[in-house]
Image: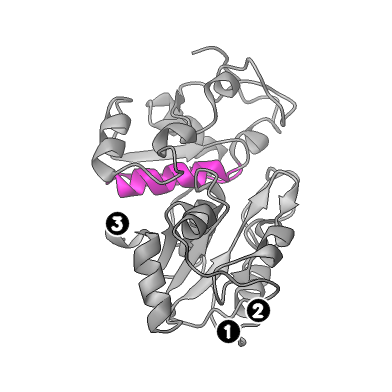
Amino acid sequence: MDNQRILVDVPALAGELARGPASAVLDVRWTMAGPDRAGYAAGHLPGAAFLDLDAALAGPPGAGGRHPLPDPGPLQDALRRAGVRAGQPVVVYDGGAQLGVAARAWWVLRWAGLADVRVLDGGYPAWVAAGEPVETGESEPGPGDVEVHPGFMRVLDAAGAAALAADGALVDARQAERFRGEKEPIDPVAGHIPGAVNQPVSETVDTDGRLLPADELRTRFEALGLPEQVGAYCGSGIMAAQTVLALTVAGYDPALYVGSWSHWITDRNRQVATGD
């Protein structure tokens, strides 16, 4: 994977779009309340199609966690409705909240076999702040023909996550108070996977929501003592995808525990740790 092709900044993307819509642009804005269709309708990048995280980039919540892997069929259908064509480059963007949702889209599309997927660094807020044009309403892309072939990204199950944690190679991407078990606003059990190390997603972006430079990320991850092959998890596999993205940019070979904490705690026999 070419680490230089993971991120695209606003000037570069604006230049590409001005020359013609070679890339499919997907708006994946989402909040804890659900997909942000209202935000998309109020303003989005020219020609961007909306992609629903809950319906396309994850399966139904349940035994696999709150955001398990999507089934290939519905994912392929959603991408085709969004106009994605076979072999076409794709750019994804979100609302700029630490790039978590866009990173999940990047990861799922790469897992599904799409070779050229980039994240707009800084998301929609960076585009607007730069004074670039926006559209309102719904874009109507032509039908796509992309085919989904899963298996192109490293995936962890609970046993794999536990094994990496035992070796100090599993990163918990949640805020420190959730990692320590002091606060758990979403899941019914507080704490973390024993042996995991904590690196909050919020500390891997700058104040404008852009990913830190690769060398700074590398220094931060090296301070955790991480080996080259690492894993990441969070509450439900969304923000941990951003950690996977950051680790990849920094030169690591990361895997994603998609079910994350919301899956880990479905088995009472799995141990739970608290504190640092």
Q: Is residue 40 magenta?
A: no
Closer to the chain start, of discs 3 and 2, is 3
Residue that numbered label 2 is attached to: 81
Q: Is residue 247 magenta?
A: yes
Q: Quadrant of the N terminus?
A: bottom left
Mark 2 secondary-structure assignment: helix
Residue that numbered label 3 is attached to: 3
Cβ atoms under marks 2 and 1 closer than 8 Å:
yes
Cβ atoms under marks 3 and 2 closer than 8 Å:
no
Q: Residue furthest top?
A: 275
Residue 252: which quarter of the image?
top left
Whether residue 116 is visible here, answered yes or no, is no
Mark 1 secondary-structure assignment: loop
Q: Position of residue 44 (x, y in %)?
A: 60, 66
The correct choice, above or below, for 197 with respect to 55 in the image is above
Q: CA distance from mark 2 to mark 1?
A: 6 Å
Closer to the chain start, of discs 2 and 1, is 2
Q: Residue furthest bottom?
A: 142
Tell me the magenta residue range. 237-259
